[in-house]
Image (spheres, grey):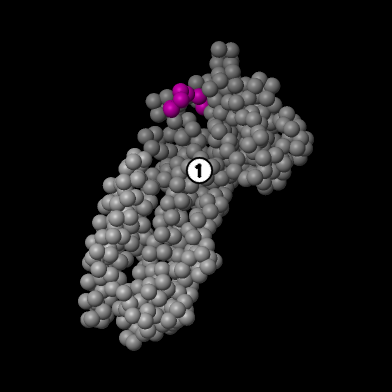
Amino acid sequence: MKLCIHDFSFLDWRNLDLELDGPEVVCVMGDSGSGKSLFLRAIADLVVSEGEAMLGDVRRDSVSASDWRKRVGYLAAEILWWEESVGEHFLKEPAIGQIERLRLPPDCMNWSPSRLSMGERQRLGILRLLDRQPKALLLDEPTANLDAANVDVVEKKLLDYIRSNDVVAIWVTHSVDQAKRVGDRVLTMKDRMLSEAGRKDNAKWAKR
Amino acid sequence: MGETVDLSIWDILFSASIVVCLGILLAYYRLGITRTLFIASVRLVVQLLLVGYVLKVLFAEGKLVYVAIMAAVMLLVASREIMARQKRRLKGWGAFGLGASTLFVSSFAIALFGLMVVVRPDPWYQPQYAIPLLGMIMSNTMSGISLSMDRLTSALHDNRAIVEQRLALGETAREAILPYMRDCIRTGIMPVVNSMGTAGIVALPGMMTGQILAGANPTEAVKYQIIIWFFIAGGVGFGMAVSLRMLESRLFDKRQRLRLDRLR
């Protein structure tokens, strides 16, 4: 699956271009307020934007907004819950193996969301996102609230999904180490521009 | 028909002394609403005295064009009031237009139905019937609409992050705000339903009380009160449905993005 962002503008950001060819992970780094989150939200059509966005052979403007958002799964930095129980947020409750693989309590689907810790919210948020079977992932710091062991299982889970479903992912992170682990390419957002900082196949970057 | 007691200016001044005492009490607790109470009381006296004279002329003349002008003034004032009661309202003329068009399609339609189908005075626009009927429907509709719209904009403002995440998961705008919408409709319609349920037992409704004070037969007065409550329920309910639908379409754009920037 290919994701093409072309001549893309939103708010004060102008003419951004980005092309991903699945399965590929592009990490985006940059200071807080540099527009990384806005960029993801604009691609998901949650922020008014101009320009072209195309996933596979589907142009964003040719399908309804909700249809497009189902295809490009956007994961917010803070995961919110609104129903009475965790399970009600899922179209199809994840198998027990999936839950245990993310080191979550086996009966957490029946829990009230208020019982979840920050880390549990984040991991369940990722399950909730993958439950919709998106063809592209727009991840805003998906491991920000996790300890090292959980970062590891979440990275594995996401990379598994990306590779086995030929998915592309734009992965916002503040950790250079994470960018090196998961990213095929690393971009930085600075002064409202995206520029390439490194590639996995570039040995110099990988060692830095 | 019994004789009615006319009130003198002294009777009104004696009654006003109650409000003066209340004002002193509120001032003692430094609630800062004594001034508001004073202004509201003066407005009440001036507006009602004036409207008394206006209605006297209106009833004497009984022309359709005067009734229409009066109805238009009521509509404008009520629309302004709906706008003023919103903590976060649409920018520009949107808020006013939304209130006015909603009141027009709900209150006016039901008042016309009441006059032409149910009460049938001769002529149908006879001001003694048309003006109070429209006024009662419109004031209740106004409260219901402003309450529910205020609640919806506040709920969406407070929960915009949740709404955005629901949209991000592929829900439509309607699905994403349905729980807030339900809550708003309940808030708007409950006062009417509660009043209907307790009418006659806990409180004697105002219109019926007025008719009885003016010497009307109580068994006739209650019949009017019953139809008035049905009209009010219709006005509030349909008005709210229309206003929330219109508000929803202004708060989301074509790509189903929540546009709180359209509120001020």
Give yes or no for residue A30 being in the magenta stretch.
yes
The answer to which quarter of the image holds residue B212 is bottom left
Residue A66 to residue B203: above or below = above
**Image check: B235 left or right of B42?**
right
**Image check: A207 left or right of B9?**
right
Magenta segment main secondary structure: loop
Position of residue B131 measured from the top left corner of the image (x, y, whole percent): 32, 74
Position of residue B214 measured from the top left corner of the image (x, y, whole percent): 35, 76
Q: Nearer the viewer, residue B212 or B121?
A: B212
Q: Nearer the viewer, residue B83 or B220?
A: B220
Position of residue B233 measured from the top left corner of the image (x, y, whole percent): 48, 68
Look at 58% across and 38% down and name the residue there. Answer: A80
Look at 28% across and 47% down and name the residue there. Answer: B35
Write down the region rendered in magenta: A28-34
The answer to which quarter of the image holds residue B250 is bottom left
Give yes or no for residue B191 being in the magenta stretch.
no
What secondary structure is found at the residue carrying circle 1?
Answer: loop
Say whether residue A46 is visible: no
Identify the residue position indicated by label 1 in the image: B159
Mark 1 belongs to chain: B
Q: Nearer the viewer, residue A133 or A168?
A: A133
Amino acid marked by disc 1: Asn
